Image: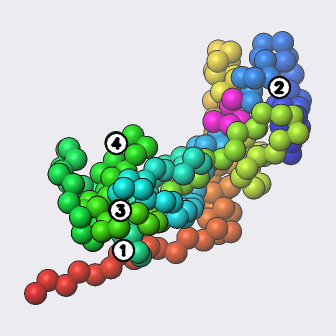
């Protein structure tokens, strides 16, 4: 469904909402639901990003950062609370401040690429011709929007009904999504202590 068709489905299901609600708020509910579904799906994306002087930033479409690896070896979070003195060597850790990540120790050549594992942020819908970034989620989006609109209006009984419908549809969508986008378990390398 397009954004216009999603809005029509909401207005058709609950006549009279058009008088109470503007299209912008409804669009916001659809986009918010897409982000929640993306997070719940835990579908990982991998992108190689440039490291400049031992520093890299997250991809612009990152919703949730999961991990990073250097030359196939996973980097661990730095256990300290502050950035240590910069030394060079083979990277083993990262230190995060906002969207900026420091590799510790800094690679010998201070550059290269790091693989970032993350959950991608779905593209927000803005135009009436836009379609959701996530496949087959139309019914979930409509249920979420109806639940939240009715909650804002103070229609508690109807909101509770649509909340239940939303969680049922969400669960059904997650089952289909996980079967379609099967994610292999990421196995960490074993470390042998001598």
In the foreground, 108 or 141: 108
The N terminus: image quadrant: top right
* Residue found at the far front of this picture: 109
> Would you name the residue on which mark 1 appears?
73
Q: Residue 106, relative to residue 40: is it above or below?
A: below
Q: Tally the marks.
A: 4
Crowd class of label 3 (few under 14; some 14 to 19; many from 20; radius 10 Å): some
Residue shown at 78%/33% (left/top)?
A: 126
Distance in Å between CA atoms under marks 1 and 3: 17 Å
Q: Is residue 7 left or right of residue 44?
A: right
Q: Residue 5, relative to residue 56: is it above or below?
A: above
Distance in Å between CA atoms under marks 4 and 2: 45 Å
Distance in Å between CA atoms under marks 2 and 3: 58 Å
Distance in Å between CA atoms under marks 4 and 1: 22 Å
Depth check, mark 4 against mark 3: the one in front is 3
Q: Is residue 15 visible?
A: yes
Is 31 inside the magenta-drawn segment? Answer: yes
> Would you name the residue on which mark 2 appears?
14
Depth check, mark 4 against mark 2: the one in front is 4
> Would you name the residue on which mark 4 appears?
97
In the foreground, 117 or 101: 101
């Amino acid at each position: 469904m397009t954004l216009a068709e999603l809005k029509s489905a909401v207005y058709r299901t609950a006549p009279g909402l058009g008088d109470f609600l503007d299209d912008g708020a409804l669009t916001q509910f659809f986009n918010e639901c897409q982000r929640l579904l993306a997070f719940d799906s835990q579908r990982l994306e991998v992108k190689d990003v440039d490291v400049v002087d031992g520093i890299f930033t997250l991809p612009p479409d990152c919703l949730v950062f999961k991990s990073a690896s250097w030359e196939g070896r996973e980097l661990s979070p730095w256990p300290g609370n502050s950035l240590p003195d910069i030394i060079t060597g083979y990277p083993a850790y990262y230190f995060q401040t906002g969207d900026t990540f420091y590799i510790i120790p800094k690679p010998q050549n201070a550059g290269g690429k790091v693989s970032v594992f993350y959950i991608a942020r779905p593209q927000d819908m803005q135009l009436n011709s836009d379609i959701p970034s996530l496949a087959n989620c139309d019914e979930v989006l409509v249920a979420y929007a109806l639940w939240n609109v009715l909650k804002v209006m103070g229609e508690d009984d109807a909101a509770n009904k649509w909340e239940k419908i939303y969680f049922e549809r969400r669960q059904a969508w997650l089952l289909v999504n996980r079967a379609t986008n099967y994610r292999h378990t990421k196995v960490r390398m074993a470390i042998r202590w001598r």
